[in-house]
Image (tube, helix red, strand yellow):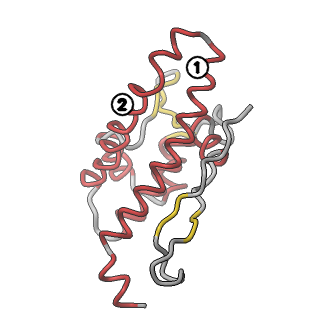
Amino acid sequence: PPPPPPPPVTTPVADAPAGEEAAVEVPEAPAVRSSLTTADDPERRWTVDQVAKLAGLSHRQLGELERYGLVVGESVDGTMQYGPDAVEVAGLCKAFIDTGVEPRHLRMFKLTAEREAAFLDQLLLPHARRKGRAALRDALEELATLAAHGERIRMLMLREEFRDDIDRIN
């Protein structure tokens, strides 16, 4: 069975009465769990030309994303092929490239993900790997839940970093 949802987090909220806190629901993990463990069609593959076209990138831009480890393909019968995650990452990176960001600067996302993965791996998986398949499955579910919480923490931290600007427009 899936783990129970986490309890609501209480935090001061702008529309709460002064000095009081309101419960803020933490996003549930199932949506993240499915996106963390499987793509919609994990077996589907695209060529370099297809990924470039789908993402709206030049071959040079796609090559740079690949060189910096953001887009990962595999050679199948001498042809590079990419899975759904690579296609989605390429499309998301395109939004940054369109604002003038060079692909090398997007590497921070990969480095952050690698650090987070190492942290969660160290926290959850060594014991589960020794205990067998069921324990590993449970640990991966917990990993998905914690990854969802980490995603929410990052969003809240970004919001805090931009608090002055947000307050200026409200």
Mark 1 Cα within 10 Å, few/some/many (few <14, many 20+)? some
Task: Estimate the x, y position of residue 4 in percent, counting from the top left.
Answer: 68, 41
Of residues 21 and 160, the one drawn nearer to the viewer in this rendering: 21
Q: Is residue 89 above or below residue 45?
A: below
Who's the residue at 37% across and 43% down the image? 70
Of residues 129 and 11, the one drawn nearer to the viewer in this rendering: 11
**In the drawing, does residue 53 fall left or right of residue 160?**
right
Task: Estimate the x, y position of residue 118 in percent, counting from the top left.
Answer: 36, 30
Q: Secondary structure at mark 1?
A: helix
Disc ID at residue 136: 1
Q: Is residue 18 above or below residue 67?
A: below
Q: Secondary structure at mark 2?
A: helix
Q: Amino acid at mark 1?
A: Leu
Quarter in which the C terminus is drawn? bottom left
Of residues 35 and 15, the one drawn nearer to the viewer in this rendering: 15
Mark closer to the chain start, 2 or 1: 2
Q: Is residue 85 above or below residue 105?
A: above
Q: Label 2 to label 1, Cα distance in Å?
A: 16 Å
Who's the residue at 52% across and 24% down the image? 76
Quarter in which the N terminus is drawn? top right
**In the drawing, does residue 80 fall left or right of residue 142?**
left
Residue extending farthest to the front is 19
Mark 2 Cα within 10 Å, few/some/many (few <14, many 20+)? few
**In the drawing, does residue 120 fall left or right of residue 43?**
left
Who's the residue at 43% across and 36% down the image? 72
Q: Amino acid at mark 2?
A: Ala
Residue extending farthest to the right is 1
Task: Estimate the x, y position of residue 45 in percent, counting from the top left.
Answer: 59, 36
Task: Estimate the x, y position of residue 137 in percent, counting from the top left.
Answer: 63, 23
Disc ID at residue 102: none
Disc ID at residue 118: 2
